[in-house]
Image: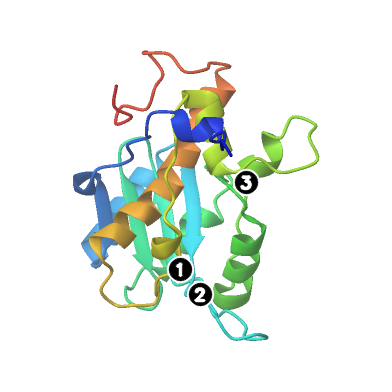
Amino acid sequence: MNIVPDSATLLPPYHGIKLADVTLVQSNLQATQALSALLAADVIGFDTESKPTFIKGEASNGPHLIQLATDDTAYLFQIGATPALDVLRAILESDDVLKVGFGLSDDLLRLRIKLGITTAKVLDLSVALRGGQRNDLGAKSAVAKFFGLRLQKSKKTSTTNWANARLTERQILYAADDAQVALRVYRCWITGNGMTKANAPRNAGP
């Protein structure tokens, strides 16, 4: 029997953010710099990560990581590991900066329950981009649609322990990409452009 591959698997891969463009916020100085850069942006990419639960009925105590991205830098905030809660609140509750991401309803709920942060001015791209369709549009589908590229998301990485004090390079890049790819998709969508040499993500490869 011949198996026809999903058309998305035939697309060239999306190459995301570089490690040099990710800041793991671990000091007051880094938090201050992140605050300045993020509040200066008109739009930022936004996502969170939580330690997975594997026992039926077990409630998540996430988020354990919050990712915020500008066009050129992603900032990762580990909850409980840095003195950055006031910085996060100032950014996430700001009415001056639009936060965009995919599938944010659970993220927003967890932020409110765990940290008392009520995130303002949020656009969930999963809903905004579905164009009248019944199902939400995920990040993979959006990258294929707007950039003609294949977003590779490792389930092995997504289900790692995000509460670890020391994140791996793979975790850092995965988390940073989740935030920045949303911003890149938003930029492309809002200008009404599809995949061209001019508007392709700068790290997207050929």
Query: Neighbour class for label 1 at 10 Å: few (<14), some, many (≥20)?
Result: some
Q: Secondary structure at mark 2?
A: loop
Q: Residue at x 44, y 50 (%)?
A: 153
Quarter holding residue 29: bottom left
Secondary structure beneath label 1: loop
- As shown in the figure, which amino acid type bears the numbered disc 1? Thr
Pick the front one: 81 or 31: 81
Q: Is residue 83 above or below residue 95?
A: below
Residues at badges 3 and 2 in contact (C-beta under 8 Å)? Answer: no
Q: Nearer the viewer, mark 1 or mark 3?
A: 1
Which corner quadrant holds the N terminus? top right
Is residue 70 visible to the viewer in this orientation of the structure? yes
Badge 2 crowding class, 10 Å Cα cut-off, few under 14, some 14 to 19, many 20 or more, is some
Question: Which residue is at a point 60% across and 57% down the rendered structure image?
Answer: 119
Q: Compare residues 38 and 106 and report the one nearer the observer.
A: 106
What residue is pinned by disc 1?
159
What is the spatial separation of the Cα atoms under label 1 and label 3, in whole angstroms? 29 Å
Q: Which amino acid lies under the numbered mark 2 shown in the image of this protein? A: Pro
Assess disc 3: are there few (<14), some (14-19) or many (≥20) residues with their C-alpha within 10 Å of its C-alpha. Answer: some
Q: Which residue is mark 2?
A: 52
**132 or 124: which is nearer to us?**
132
Residue visible at 41% across and 18% down in the picture: 199
Q: Secondary structure at mark 3?
A: loop
Q: Which residue is mark 3?
A: 121
Q: Quadrant of residue 100?
A: top right
Please tell me which of labels 2 and 1 falls first in the chain.
Answer: 2
**Residue 64 position in % (x across, y down):** 44, 72
Q: Name the one closer to the observer, 112 or 146.
A: 146
- 106 sits to left or right of 80: right
